[in-house]
Amino acid sequence: MSSTLPPALALGSGVTLLGVTRILARQGLAVRASVSEKDFVAASRWLRRDAGLPAIGASAGLDLEMDGGTRVAATLADQGAAALAALGEAPGTALVNLGTGGFVLRRVAGPGHGPEGYLLGPLCRAAGGTAWAAEGTINGIGPLVAGLKGGPTSLAEDDPAPDAFCLPDAAGVGAPHWRAGLGPVFSPAAESLGPAGRRRAALEGIVFRVREIVDDLARDAPVTRLLVAGGLAAGPDTGHFLTAGLAACTGREVARLEEPEATLLGAARLAAGVPQAAPGARAVAAAGGYLGPKYARWRAWLEGVLA
């Protein structure tokens, strides 16, 4: 990309901003940002703050009057608001969202507390300090599953296709590998299957990618519980496979988030100054016992794909 292009201007301070600036920087476009935390810039290789731009202040306690008398008490991005509502202050919990795209997000203490290859940024900034999170992404899984016919997909205890593997990222491989232009990838054994078999391989691949990310995010502190949300996790032909499969594959407690408006709930609590508390969730029983042992073989296959 030509170096004569003007720099991109990014406003914000969260993990989404970091993902956007990473993409722009890799295309050779300079990025200047107005952000709320100097440590966020220091922790990033892709971001530098423009001294001519104002700093973004706190997320809550604003009390800003708008035209018409409306007063703004807080401002927060949708993903940050949902994470605050879903995770609350519960230690050891990670949020797994499986929708158009997938992401795994857990709260961390701040810069230096996330594994290499993952997005790190503040969720919000309030009087009590800054809430930070590390995030791993799985790109384009919703369109991939939607394009594969043969559902609903049942979850058996025995593996119907032991050599069928899938890397399900359909819009470039996300964290921690970051391989633009790669994916989705099916093993030869998976390619030889019919529509239902390829769909099963894709759902297994989503389960395996989530486990890969969760295991990485658990390096600094244990992750004992997964709170799962999103359209794929609730879908009648995908939800049981993904949630019960995650419980079997990861060996962790898995629960499905029951609050349909977590984003609004998190923002409302922040604006009202009410402490964030974990919302209702339904525990999921493990099924698909073959997924745990198969994960190790999938990892070995993935190394060859990424080589």
Image (cartoon, rainbow, N blue to C red):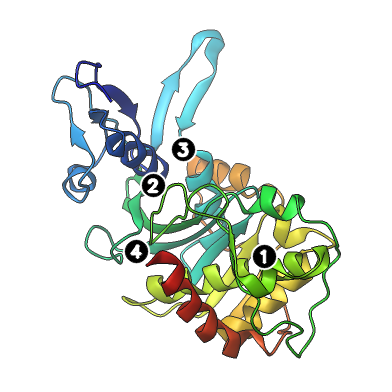
Task: Give the label on residue 76, or none.
Answer: 3
Residue 21 placement (x, y as % from top left): 32, 37
The image's mark for residue 108 is 4
Q: Is mark 4 on a helix, strand or loop?
A: strand
Mark 3 belongs to which amino acid? Leu
The residue that label 2 is drawn on is: 15
Q: Nearer the viewer, residue 146 or 192?
A: 192
Name the disc covering residue 285, or none: none
Which amino acid, mark 2? Val
For image coordinates 64% across by 81% down, the residue present is 163
Residue hosting label 1:
202
**Crowding at mark 1 (Cα within 10 Å: few <14, some 14-19, many 20+):** many
Q: Distance between the residues labelled 4 and 3?
A: 18 Å
Residue 157 is left or right of residue 169, and the answer is right
Q: Earlier in the sequence, mark 1 or mark 2?
A: 2
Q: Can residue 252 be seen in this view?
A: no
Q: How far apart are marks 1 and 3 (CA)?
A: 34 Å
